[in-house]
Amino acid sequence: MPEVLEHKSACVAFELKSLDEATGEFEGYGSTFGNVDLGGDIVAKGAFAATIADHGKAGTMPAMLFSHDSNEPVGDWLDMAEDKRGLRMRGKLWIGKGIPKAEQAYLMLKGRGAKGLSIGYVTKKAEFDDKKNTRTLLQVELHEVSPTPFPMNPKATVSSVKTAIRLPDNFTKRDLETCLRDAGLSITQAKALLASGYKAIDPRDADEEAIKESIRNNLRILKG
């Protein structure tokens, strides 16, 4: 299975638990367990246990970026832990330091508009249910957690590729399906594309140009 960095928003269940206006410290959930998202994924309880332990041993934390932009770090994560609901995060924005994106993230979290946290991760173990068209994430390697506005289009909650894809020499149809899902398609759309080509995707279910561009980009990567 190719290893790719994926993104997933906790927009359906995001809840800002607290925000300290003096220090910029806040708490919220980066991911929740058990619910099926619009990309057909379910995060299982325990999916973050290994990566939390690895960060603990190394004395590190995932990066805090603004909307997954690696050029825009906006703070530090101070603590992360799994509870019954999901991945609970506590962090501190770098406010009052002359960092525009940190100030923007603070104002976004403080405001009444759309807001959320989104994780950047690599899937290490997953189970597929072809009958239900779902993928259950059993173990993920967490790289970053970003404050981000909720996507106005709920389809934007599906995973997207942010690093080069490298398929194994003996890749399978499942590997291709995973790459297409990471490009921004749902399980149903990926299966339809592999079975019948691009025309099989209902344009009402996706941003046509965005999907085409994702596929073009990933095909260039695969050929490279």
Image (cartoon, helix red, strand yellow):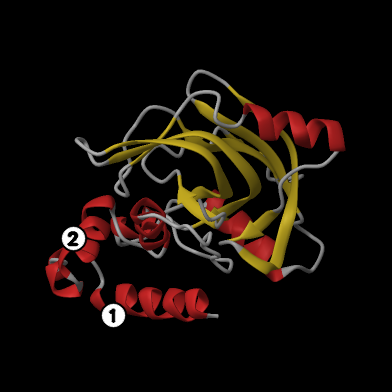
Q: Residues within 10 Å of mark 1 (few under 14, many from 20)?
A: few
- For image coordinates 31% across by 72% down, the residue present is 211
Amino acid type for the residue under numbered disc 2: Ala
* Residue 3 in sight: yes
Q: Which residue is the site of mark 1?
A: 209
Q: Are marks 1 and 2 in contact (CB under 8 Å)?
A: no
Residue 52 image offset from top left, x and y in percent: 70, 32
Residue 32 versus residue 190 in the image, above or below: above
Judged from the image, the secondary structure of the residue bearing numbered disc 1 is helix
Q: Residue 95 is drawn in which quadrant?
A: bottom right
Q: Residue 5 is drawn in which quadrant?
A: bottom right
Q: Nearer the viewer, residue 220 or 39?
A: 220
Amino acid type for the residue under numbered disc 1: Glu
* Residue 80 in sight: no
Label annotation for residue 148: none
Q: Residue furthest top?
A: 84
Residue 143 image offset from top left, x and y in percent: 66, 49
Q: Residues within 10 Å of mark 2 (few under 14, many from 20)?
A: some
Q: Residue 128 is drawn in which quadrant?
A: top left
Residue 221 versus residue 67 in the image, above or below: below
- For image coordinates 51% across by 28% down, the residue present is 86
Sooner in the amino-acid sequence: mark 1 or mark 2: 2
The alpha-carbon separation of the residues under discs 1 and 2 comes to 17 Å
Task: From the image, state whether disc 1 or disc 2 is nearer to you.
Answer: 2
Label annotation for residue 192: 2
Quarter of the image for the C terminus: give it. Answer: bottom right
- For image coordinates 16% across by 67% down, the residue present is 201
- For image coordinates 56% across by 20% down, the residue present is 83
Judged from the image, the secondary structure of the residue bearing numbered disc 2 is helix
Residue 105 image offset from top left, x and y in percent: 61, 58
